[in-house]
Amino acid sequence: MDTKILLDESDIPREWYNVVADMPNPPAPPLGPDGQPVGPEALEAIFPPGVIEQEASAERWITIPDAVREVLRLWRPSPLYRAHRLEQALETPARIFYKNESVSPAGSHKPNTAVAQAFYNRQAGIKRLTTETGAGQWGCALSLAGQLFGLDVRVFMVRVSYEQKPYRRTLMQTWGGEVFASPTDLTESGRKILARDPDTPGSLGIAISEAAEEAAGRADTNYALGSVLNHVLLHQTVIGLEARKQMERIGAYPDEVYAPCGGGSNFGGIAFPFFADKATGREVRLVAVEPTSCPTLTKGLYTYDFGDAIGLTPLLKMFTLGHDFVPPGIHAGGLRYHGDAPLVSQLHEEGLVDAVAIPQLETFQAGVLFARTEGIVPAPESTHAIAAVIRSARECARSGEPRTLLFNLSGHGHFDMAAYERYFAGDLKDFEYPAEAIEKSLAHLPHFGDG
Ligand SMILES: *Cc1c(COP(=O)(O)O)cnc(C)c1O
């Protein structure tokens, strides 16, 4: 059987799939500070109309503009691989497939939405975009997309990553992005945090506050978010739509679908098109994989919380560890967000999507095994999905069951070699976020008038 299952450029999806159409219950609405649902107009200060419309849409299929498909052609369709050598190494009867999103110029799935967001902002006459970045992947994706659509991009990069990953910074600058270590003294939000804690490693929540504040204050500037929101997950469904077609080509269908889960966008991207089948009665297990150090879906609370650290965003109903949760400086920087996409959260709450948390050392073991068998050095985020797949494949080896496993290889680790270096040096530890620390952060959840 082939190792790579390839599609033609004409097979790039023409429409994104909107999971809202197949959810058993409508999504819980975002709320304003008064506890009342906010309308789309609340987002107008920072998002273009095309994006706002998608954020609230319940249409099953949404047309991908030609200008977006033209750019996606630079790397899509991405290949689907059969992991023959990994299977052999595990001596498992399981069939393991992975979608390789590391083939994009930025090395991850994130350009799939960056390109769409840049397009809609350009269409609305916007000149500049601000954003946050954790591991640097999103800042790279948006810098690239901004360049392709003629927009300036300013990136607030979480300080710990800014220091750990100097080449990510240079990559963003190569694509024309402007990069600052967050918190900065350029924004009210940043100054407030620095006054409280001058040595803070920063967090995604803080960086989001800074980027959103600047975008809200300037008419020529909008904000772009790399995950969490409905429109971002929508744009990422090209992953699952292609994967479903690729598996169909070889007469296969997954029993289990895995993806690393930070804000939930690449998980939604690969899993939702299979959820469409699940909604019609097909058996398929969808599993979001997160670190034990930031266990949002597995240890968080399903409730309304802010999307950022300061409390500037509308309240989103999601699994959260509390908006002022600052996770340890683990090496899967893209998985350090305090919350999870409302769509993924709701489906998890309803028992339709599973979640598992994996400790850091097991993820690096999995990443090294993958590199030594399949050749690709995975991003530390992606190793979470690989580790979960390996657990399942080992179970198949014990039971003799030939399950079909699919995962999203969300990115490569070429800019994360410092993380692998520390792993080989024995410097990395497992970190289980202490229950008391989670409780403390959850105590700061927003309260409404009558509690
Ligand atoms: C950002 C990132 C993730 C996690 O983000 P999601 O929003 O959960 O998709 C996973 N893998 C890589 C390589 C990333 O860059």
Image (cartoon, grey):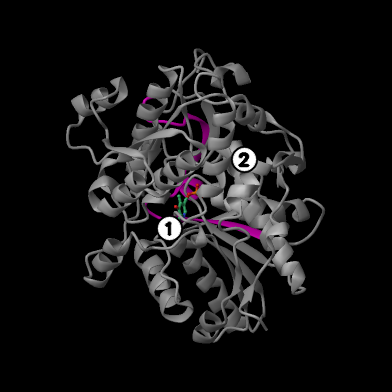
Q: Which mark is residue 275?
A: none
Q: Percent x, y for residue 364?
A: 37, 68
- Labels 2, 1: front one: 1
Q: Is residue 233 visible?
A: yes
Residue occupied by mark 1: 381
Looking at the rendered image, the quarter that the N terminus falls into is bottom right
Q: Secondary structure at mark 1?
A: loop
What stretch of residues is rendered in magenta? 285-310
Left or right side of 305 for 273: right
Which residue in the structure is indicated by mark 2? 343
Image position, residue 93 (x, y; %): 62, 83
Q: Position of residue 190 (x, y in %)?
A: 28, 27
Q: Does ligand 1 reach within 8 Å of label 2's beta carbon?
A: no
Q: Nearer the viewer, residue 417 or 349?
A: 417
Of residues 331 and 115, the one nearer the viewer is 115
Question: The residue tagged with tag 2: helix, strand or loop?
Answer: helix
What type is the residue that disc 2 sits on?
Leu
Q: What amino acid is at disc 1?
A: Glu
Q: CA distance from mark 2 to mark 1?
A: 20 Å
Residue 444 makes an appearance in the image: no
